[in-house]
Image (tube, rainbow, N blue to C red):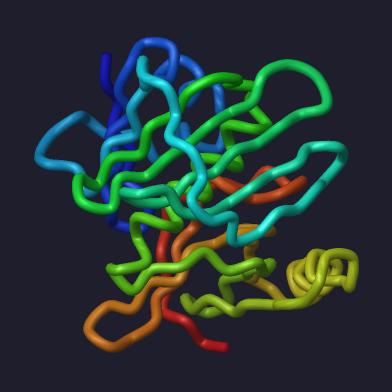
Amino acid sequence: MIHDYLIAGHRIRVEGERLVQAVDALTGFIPFKVMADGEPLCHFVESTTEAPLFETVLYTNEIDGIVSHFGRYNNGFLFVMLPPEGEALELWLDKNKQVASFKGNYNLRLLRFACWIAYGVVTVPFKTVAIHTSTIVCEGKAILFLGESGTGKSTHTRLWRENIQGTVLLNDDSPILRIIDGEPWIYGSPWSGKTPCYKNESYPLAA
């Protein structure tokens, strides 16, 4: 079983019955689903082998009791999420084969974040990066509002939408910036934080 998703112009193929069903349950991915056709940039696969071991842990963080570790193994990058209860979700990315292998706990909250990490790593060489921002579209161009969580990004974009006619929300947490022919473009993404806003659209960056 395979499903393809086209995110910021990059085709991602999800393979393996359990993983496909889990990603299908992520509401944000629905607008990005496309016919499985052509060669994907990366394969997200359900692994039946053991995850590799860390050679180097580059960072560790904890959010709501979920402890995450990101680092390197001998052939790429490894990401492990440890929830307060239940098994871990393990993700490792083979730097040579453009394959992201998933194993373990497909809790939707864990899986959504692991897919974000995987997409971010595989698309960096293609001048693509997810930006923590609330983003509106005004007069056909995207405007990004950046800041730490809780400082008012979403409030600011809401005020624009309430007071400036024709202004709409593109994404409220993690749109994707991609450089195309030297110009920055902003894409909607399957990741939008607490505000559901999943639009498969793109606009040139204004500010």
Q: Which of 193 and 87 is in front in this view?
A: 87
Q: Nearer the viewer, residue 192 or 21?
A: 21
Q: Which residue is drawn at 22% across and 30% down?
A: 35
Q: Which of 147 and 185 is in front in this view?
A: 147
Q: Outermost residue toward the left?
A: 38
Q: Which residue is drawn at 38% across and 32% down?
A: 101
Residue 163, percent from left and from top: 80, 75
Q: Is residue 10 left or right of residue 196?
A: left
Q: Residue at x 36, y 58 (%)?
A: 8
Q: Outermost residue toward the front?
A: 55
Q: Quadrant of the C terminus?
A: bottom right
Can you say whether 12 is above or below 188 in the image? above
Q: Quadrant of residue 147?
A: bottom right
Q: In this view, does 36 lie to the left or right of 164?
A: left
Q: Residue at x 25, y 47 (%)?
A: 98
Q: Quadrant of the N terminus?
A: top left
Can you say whether 132 is above or below 46 in the image? below
